[in-house]
C-alpha cells in the first residue's frame, strides 16, 4: 500500500457512515487503513514513505464492504497510522522519543511504546528512527488533533447514537496482521484472532461461538492470543452498558497477493464471513436479553 502526501484541502481525517438498525446494531471501526499523510508530517520523516506504510493494515477497509452493504455503520481513519495510532492511549509514549521538556509528563512506557509503537510510532525493526528528531509538545498535539482525537470523537458519537436508537451495539474493530510465526508446539498458527480484553470489552460468548465455527480457507481462530485488543475496544467497549466491542485481526495472506495488493474476492469472502459473525453476535445478545427478561 502506498502512502499519499495529503494537501491542506483534505476535507476530513475520518470517514463516517451512520446506519444500523435494531436487528443489526453494528459499527465497524477501521483505524489503520488510512493512506493519507499530511505534508507537515512527511517533512518530519527520516524514513521513506514505503517504510512508514509498513505501519498500516493495508486495504483492511475492503473487508468491511459486506458489513456496510448489510447496514452497519462505519468509522474509518483516512490518515495513515504513521501520523498517530488511534489504537493507543494518548499517554502511551516512550519519554525518550519526546523532547526533554515533555518527558516528565509521561510515565514508564509499556512494552509496545518501548519498541517504538506508542501513540506516535517512532521505530520499526530494520528501519531505525522514523522521524528526524524527538517530538515537541506542539508536534505531538498537532498529530493527536489531526486524527487521534477526531477518530475517538467520531466513534463515541456513532456508539452513543446507535445505543440511543437500538439499545445495544456490536463494535467490530477491524485490523490485519502479518502471519504469526510457526512454533514447535504450534505448527499451524492462527490466521484470525478475536480480542475481547479477556471478556472485559464484550460478552465472552461472542468470540467463543465464532471460534467454534468453520472459518474462511479453513483458517484457525484464536481468542485473545496474541492480540487481546487495544485502546479502541478498551475505551469504547462497555458490555454491562450494552456496548460489546471485539477486535478482529486477519492474516494478510488471507486477502493480499504476493505483491501486497488486495485480491477482491478473498477480501469480500472475509467480509461475508465477518458479516455472518456480526449477525450471530447480534442474535446471541438478543436471545440472552430475551431470556433475562422472561426470567424476571
Image (cartoon, grey):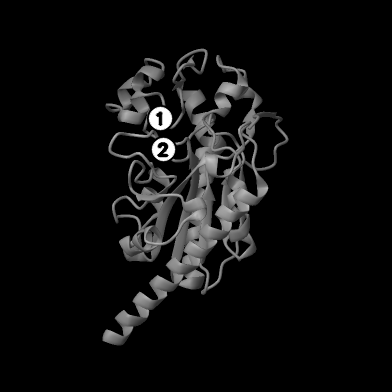
**SS under mark 1:** loop
Q: Quick one: 100 or 19, which is closer to the camera?
A: 19
Q: Which mark is residue 118?
A: 1
Q: Position of residue 66 (x, y in %)?
A: 61, 59
| Viewport quadrant of the N terminus | top right
Q: Quick one: 183 or 118, which is closer to the camera?
A: 183
Q: Residues within 10 Å of mark 2 (few under 14, many from 20)?
A: many
Q: Which mark is residue 88?
A: 2
Q: Quadrant of residue 58?
A: top right
Q: Can you say whether 19 is above or below 141 in the image? A: below
Left or right of 230? Residue 84 is right
Q: Residues within 10 Å of mark 1 (few under 14, many from 20)?
A: many
Q: Are marks 2 and 1 in contact (CB under 8 Å)?
A: yes
Q: Can you say whether 277 is above or below 104 in the image? A: below
Left or right of 282? Residue 40 is right
Q: Quick one: 89 or 123, which is closer to the camera?
A: 123
The answer to whether residue 244 is seen in the rendering is yes
**SS under mark 2:** loop
Earlier along the polypeptide chain: callout 2 or callout 1? 2
The answer to whether residue 15 is seen in the rendering is no
Q: Position of residue 250 (x, y in %)?
A: 49, 45
Residue at the spot x=56%, y=25% of the render?
A: 52
Q: Can you say whether 204 is above or below 123 in the image? A: below
| Viewport quadrant of the C terminus | bottom left
Residue at the spot x=35%, y=21% of the render?
A: 95
Q: Position of residue 216 (x, y in %)?
A: 51, 54
Residue at the spot x=59%, y=50% of the render?
A: 63
Residue at the spot x=28%, y=38% of the render?
A: 185
Q: Position of residue 60 (x, y in %)?
A: 57, 44
Q: Which mark is residue 185?
A: none
Q: What's the distance in space between the residues labelled 2 and 1, CA to CA?
A: 6 Å
Left or right of 50? Residue 288 is left
Amino acid at each position: 500500500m502506498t502512502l499519499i502526501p495529503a494537501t491542506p484541502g483534505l476535507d476530513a481525517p475520518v470517514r463516517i457512515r451512520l446506519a444500523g438498525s435494531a436487528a443489526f446494531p453494528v459499527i465497524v471501526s477501521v483505524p489503520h487503513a488510512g493512506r493519507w499523510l499530511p505534508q507537515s508530517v512527511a517533512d518530519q520523516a527520516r524514513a521513506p514513505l514505503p517504510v512508514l506504510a509498513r505501519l498500516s493494515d493495508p486495504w483492511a477497509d475492503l473487508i468491511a464492504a459486506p458489513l456496510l452493504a448489510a447496514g452497519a455503520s462505519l468509522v474509518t481513519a483516512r490518515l495513515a497510522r504513521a501520523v498517530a495510532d488511534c489504537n493507543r492511549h494518548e499517554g502511551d509514549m516512550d519519554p525518550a522519543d519526546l523532547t526533554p521538556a515533555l518527558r516528565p509528563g509521561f510515565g514508564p512506557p509499556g512494552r509496545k511504546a518501548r519498541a517504538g509503537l506508542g501513540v506516535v510510532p517512532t521505530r520499526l525493526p530494520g528501519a531505525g528512527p522514523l522521524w528526524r528528531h524527538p517530538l515537541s509538545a506542539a508536534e505531538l498535539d498537532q498529530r493527536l488533533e489531526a486524527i487521534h482525537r477526531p477518530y475517538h470523537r467520531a466513534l463515541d458519537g456513532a456508539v452513543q447514537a446507535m445505543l440511543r436508537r437500538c439499545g445495544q451495539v456490536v463494535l467490530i474493530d477491524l485490523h490485519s496482521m502479518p502471519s504469526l510465526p510457526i512454533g514447535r508446539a504450534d505448527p499451524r498458527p492462527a490466521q484470525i484472532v478475536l480480542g475481547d480484553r479477556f471478556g472485559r470489552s464484550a460478552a465472552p460468548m461472542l468470540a467463543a461461538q465464532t471460534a467454534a465455527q468453520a472459518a474462511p480457507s479453513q483458517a484457525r481462530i484464536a481468542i485473545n492470543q496474541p492480540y487481546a485488543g487495544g485502546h479502541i475496544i478498551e475505551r469504547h467497549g462497555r458490555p454491562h452498558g450494552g456496548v460489546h466491542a471485539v477486535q478482529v485481526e486477519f492474516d494478510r495472506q488471507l486477502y493480499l497477493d504476493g505483491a501486497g495488493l488486495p485480491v477482491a474476492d478473498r477480501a469480500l469472502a472475509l467480509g461475508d464471513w465477518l458479516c455472518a459473525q456480526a449477525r450471530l453476535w447480534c442474535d446471541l445478545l438478543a436471545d440472552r436479553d430475551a431470556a433475562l427478561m422472561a426470567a424476571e
